[in-house]
Image (tube, rainbow, N blue to C red):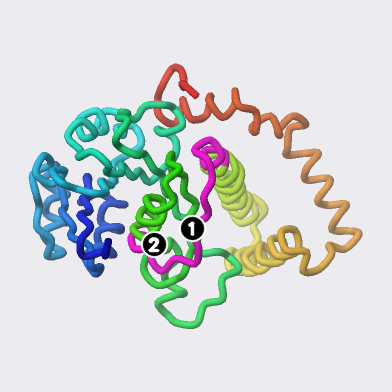
Amino acid sequence: MSAAQVNVTVIGAGGKMGMRVSANLQKSAYQVRYSENSPAGQERVLGEGREITDTAAAIDGADVVILAVPDTVLGVVSQEVVPQMKGGSTLLTLDPAAAYAGLLAQREDVTPAVAHPCHPSVFLERYTKEEYEDTFGGAAAPQNVVAAIETGDAAKQQAVEDVIKVIYAPVIDVHWVTVKQLAVLEPTLVETVACMIGTLLNEALHETVHTVGVPEAAAKAILFGHVQIALTNALRGSNPFSEACEIAIQYGKDTIIKDDWKKIFDDSELDHVIGKMLKLEDVRS
């Protein structure tokens, strides 16, 4: 089936992610319908020259329904949407938390899938001004995507991958994993660890400037350059750290990191953090 024969619906088309995926779908050959309930969101959709379709009408006959709504309401929205979907269609969400927690409405004849963008790599070779400015991905800088789908149908998986490559374009590759594996990647690996380290760096920069008194320009210059070196040496093995640097690294680990920090990879801890993110008492995994 060609893209022109595939009907794609975006629920929450006026939100942050809804606007991002809609911008790429609007340029594609897919037949796309946009649904948005909030007045502010509707204004954003209309401002981009897209028509707004009532949710029920937008779902009717759709081959792929994308839920571009906040994680905390995915379960509730899916309960409304899934019963209206046609048999053989796919429900595509953009984050694994709700799927992992078992919050999404289920139907035997509707295939659930999740696809989360990796964002352009810190090691990506960029050639144009547009690529440099696209730090999030989905506009000019190429990125990878990690996805999960519950089907043994290779043709269906390929059809969903085709949609994924459009909504997150330009895409280098789509890496297929299980829903649980995707949940370990996001939040554990990239939010609990990587994003936390990013905020720690910002706090350390603030202390360096405002407590110690180092000029801000000098502090930023050395930090931003050394972040690049730290990442390429640690993650790519580009160069070994010096002996003195290794001593400082170990001092940092002993001082800042708890001995049992790797417990975040336990299933119970994954359930705990996703429960907190979704504001749930328990996670059904």
Residue visible at 37% across and 50% down? 156
**Which residue extends farthest right?**
243
Residue underneath mark 2: 165
Q: CA distance from mark 1 to mark 2?
A: 8 Å
Q: Nearer the viewer, residue 102 or 12?
A: 102
Tell me the SS state at disc 2: helix
Residue under the point 15% across and 54% down: 33
- Above-or-below relation of 71 to 234: above
Mark 1 in CB contact with mark 2 (< 8 angstroms): yes
Q: Amino acid at mark 1?
A: Val
Mark found first going from the N terminus, 1 or 2: 2
Residue drawn at the location 50% of the way across and 63% of the way down: 173
Magenta-tinted stretch: 165-184
The image quarter containing residue 57 is: top left
Q: Is residue 168 magenta?
A: yes
In the picture, measured across the screen, residue 153 lies left or right of residue 167, that is: right
Q: Quadrant of the N terminus?
A: bottom left
Q: Is residue 128 magenta?
A: no
Q: Residues within 10 Å of mark 2 (few under 14, many from 20)?
A: many
Judging by the rendered image, the residue that carries numbered circle 1 is: 174
